[in-house]
Image (tube, grey):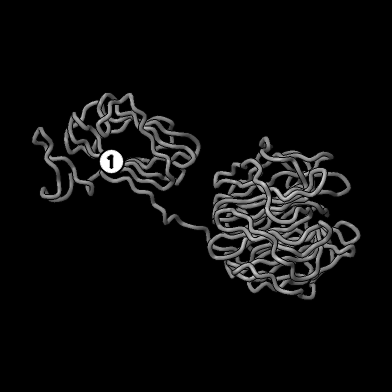
Amino acid sequence: MSGPVANNVFRSSGVIASAAGGLSWQDVVTASTVTVSAGNGYPINTTSNTCTITLPSSAEAGDQIIFLDYARTWGTYEIIIDSNGLNYQGEDDTFTVQYNTSGQTVSIVYSGATVGWIPESDVDVTDAPTPPPTQKGIFAYGNSGSYVSLSNLVNSSGVIASDVTGVGTARADMAATSYGTDKAIYGYGYTGSVVSITNLVSSSGVVATDTTGVGTARRVLAGATYGGDKALFAYGLTGSNVSMSNLVSSSGVVATDTTGVGTARNALDAAGYGDDKAIYGYGVTSGVVSMTNLVSNSGVVATDVTGVGTARGNIAAAGYGSTGQAIFGFGLSPATAITNLVTNVGVVGSDVSGVGTARRELGATRYGGDKAIFAYGTTGSVTAVSNLVSSSGVVASDTSGVGTARWGAIGAGYSTSA
């Protein structure tokens, strides 16, 4: 027991119960079941599974137990409380008690046999940590008339640097995305045949050599971040359209195929939104489409949402803004420069008249914390022009290109340091 007696509660037996400040905090619980004791606090980690918590079979008034969401994953894998013969908020233990809000902390106190355990505090910690914003970007690979593996870095002011000699297999039609908050990954693509190799990009913008691919080889797919520090590749073309996805861990490890959700298609793109979720949009089935698919903060792809805006393929997308917005832009329907803004809850806006050279098979990335840039592509002839996007989603006119003109130079953000 700790704390002055005045701050503690007398049990009905006359024994003084520990105050909240005197709780004994236990080791983090990762198991699917745990039996708990009064006077303790338990961090419950449900990253991989739900957890059923069995309360003591006997208790006295004033007994207290606290549970907290260790990894902010109760929204994905909940906790279930078994009151073990005692009442919980006046109901017997045949009732189901569960908590499924990420970031929640639950403090329960035993009141006596009639009502039993009562949650005296049930708090959702809404001010969750958010990942630091991406400051720099990279455009890499593509086809200038032949496949190339060169890259061009983008600084935190949106200035594209000259060519850096490439590392890894020269190819186009791949996807790229940020991961781990400050790194990037390029994956899959086409060299004359589809491949599933990946190349990691360090927090200083250095492209690594090929990593043997995991998952089905394909091209014209898309990549996006989710969950703050993870990523996924989804959809694409193997010879026929597919809707499978591959999750990427916070350390850049690509997982095996996950059965796809939504219409199989290619030539779409994706971006993160709302700080921890993603959206895939547009693309080609047997013709161009404008549907979208939202991705949860646990990497689950949702079913099709009827699209807003002009159906098109060979589009580019990136996040922007200080509250988690995104933008889809340009594409082929025929070649256009229109854009569609996405709110921080994943709602796609109607067409915004295009600014800059209409083109397709370009790339886009976030930079400078809250801005974005579209660059490269083809109008029928390859180009290196770029267009900056402000923190409010306004696309600027063309900036003369830097680096080798090419199509398929895919963009991704890296570095949290300006």
Residue in the image at 78% along x and 53% along y: 313
Question: How many tags in the picture?
Answer: 1
**Residue on which disc 1 sits:** 119
Please provide percent x and percent y for residue 222: 72, 50
Is 369 left, or right, of 94 in this rendering? right
Is residue 70 among the parts visible in the rendering? yes
Q: Which of 352 and 329 is in front in this view?
A: 352
Quick one: quadrant of the N terminus?
top left
Is residue 141 among the parts visible in the rendering? no
Quick one: quadrant of the C terminus?
bottom right
Type of amino acid under label 1: Pro
Is 41 left, or right, of 62 in this rendering? right
Q: Nearer the viewer, residue 206 or 333?
A: 333
Q: Residues within 10 Å of mark 1 (few under 14, many from 20)?
A: some
Is 244 left, or right, of 67 in this rendering? right
Determine which quarter of the picture holds residue 365.
bottom right
Residue in the image at 76% along x and 66% along y: 375
Q: In this view, does 272 lie above or below 118?
A: below
Residue in the image at 82% along x and 46% along y: 287
Q: Nearer the viewer, residue 359 or 309?
A: 309
Please provide percent x and percent y for residue 228: 55, 53
Is 56 left, or right, of 152 in this rendering? left
Q: Label 1, secondary structure: give it.
A: strand
